[in-house]
């Protein structure tokens, strides 16, 4: 019992004070190639895939046609392909969605789960251990390099660095990382650190239980009675909706949403939309290269 407790304590210290190494090769991995890869995936998930450039990435969700969440994923632009990383339990859903809707698009779908390994470096020393001189600091930034003379893809995470490599090269890459200070730990201890950091995970915190805690309504944005029934909202997501309104309807909808916002509340619209000619009541602010519109506090 004491030995087990000591082992857990040592693993926890590595993950929070040094650099822990967790083998996550079992995660689901796919790749998309072809000239239509970005535009196709952009229409299937919830984030801006067309805006990605090589070396960058993003987090996104994929949904049913009715908006039910099927899972989440990382999308990494490696230059010659888009690498998709998801929970293993969601892999088949993601594969089926892509295969079903890619007809007519110049896109090739590749399986990478078995062929590619994934080692997660977690902790404040992660970047030192892997030697991330060319890797950006923003989450999902990625770069090709070598570890232990084996080709790898490094990805910046919220907790450290992920290392993708060929499955056959995992032992050599792991040994190289351990030689520079990484301490191999288990997923169970890494889960403790994740929960402490407040990082949600699909299938654990993000599941149908969340959906059952949400009230869903159909609301006409230019119906004063319906919108005025909604008050003190902190955030309104209204992406790619206003582009379909005429100017009069657009001004009315934005005015009603303004009234629905709490003081300091935020309205988010699509990347192709602007409220510059619609209202001056909401202050535009740039956050992580995204324009948000904020209501003044009371």
Image (cartoon, rainbow, N blue to C red):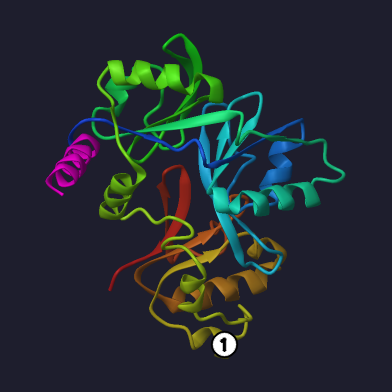
Q: Residue at x 69, y 38 (%)?
A: 38
Side (left or right) of 227 relative to 191: right
**Which residue shows up at 53% across the image and 49% down it?**
87
Residue labelled with disc 1: 226
| In the foreground, 266 or 56 | 56
* SS for callout 1: helix
Q: In which quadrant is the C terminus drawn?
A: bottom left
Q: Quadrant of residue 15?
A: top left
Left or right of 88: which side holds 20?
A: left
Q: Where does residue 29 sit, x and y in percent of width and height?
A: 59, 38
Q: Which residues are magenta?
A: 1-16
* In-front residue for pair 252/31: 31
Residue 10 magenta-drawn? yes
Instruction: Residue 92: give x, y in percent of width and height.
Output: 66, 51
Instruction: Find the residue positioned furthest to the top.
Output: 149
With respect to residue 292, does 38 lie above or below?
above
Q: Main secondary structure of the magenta part?
A: helix
User: Most extreme residue toward the left, as rendered?
Assistant: 2
């Amino acid at each position: 019992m004491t030995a087990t407790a000591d082992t857990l304590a040592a693993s926890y210290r590595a993950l929070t004070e040094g650099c822990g190494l967790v083998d996550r090769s079992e995660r689901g991995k796919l790749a998309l190639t072809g000239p239509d890869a970005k535009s196709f995936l952009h229409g299937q998930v919830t984030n801006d895939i067309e805006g990605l450039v090589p070396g960058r990435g993003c987090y996104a969700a994929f949904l049913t046609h009715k908006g039910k969440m099927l899972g989440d994923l990382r999308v990494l632009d490696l230059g010659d392909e888009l690498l998709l990383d998801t929970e293993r339990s969601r892999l088949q859903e993601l594969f089926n969605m892509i295969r079903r809707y890619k007809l007519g698009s110049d896109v090739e779908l590749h399986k990478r789960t078995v062929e590619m390994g994934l080692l997660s470096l977690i902790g404040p020393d992660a970047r030192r251990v892997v030697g991330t001189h060319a890797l950006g600091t923003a989450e999902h930034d990625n770069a090709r390099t070598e570890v232990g003379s084996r080709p790898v893809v490094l990805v910046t995470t919220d907790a450290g660095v992920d290392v993708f490599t060929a499955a056959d090269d995992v032992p050599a890459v792991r040994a190289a990382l351990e030689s520079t200070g990484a301490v191999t730990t288990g997923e169970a201890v890494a889960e403790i650190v994740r929960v402490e950091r407040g990082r949600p995970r699909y299938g654990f915190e993000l599941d149908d239980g969340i959906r059952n805690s949400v009230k869903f309504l159909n609301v006409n944005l230019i119906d004063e009675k319906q919108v005025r029934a909604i008050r003190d909202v902190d955030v309104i997501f209204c992406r790619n909706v206003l582009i379909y309104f005429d100017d009069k309807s657009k001004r009315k909808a934005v005015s009603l949403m303004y009234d629905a916002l709490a003081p300091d509340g935020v309205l988010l619209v699509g990347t192709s939309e602007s409220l510059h000619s619609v209202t001056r009541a909401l202050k535009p602010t740039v956050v992580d290269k995204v324009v948000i519109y904020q209501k003044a506090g009371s």
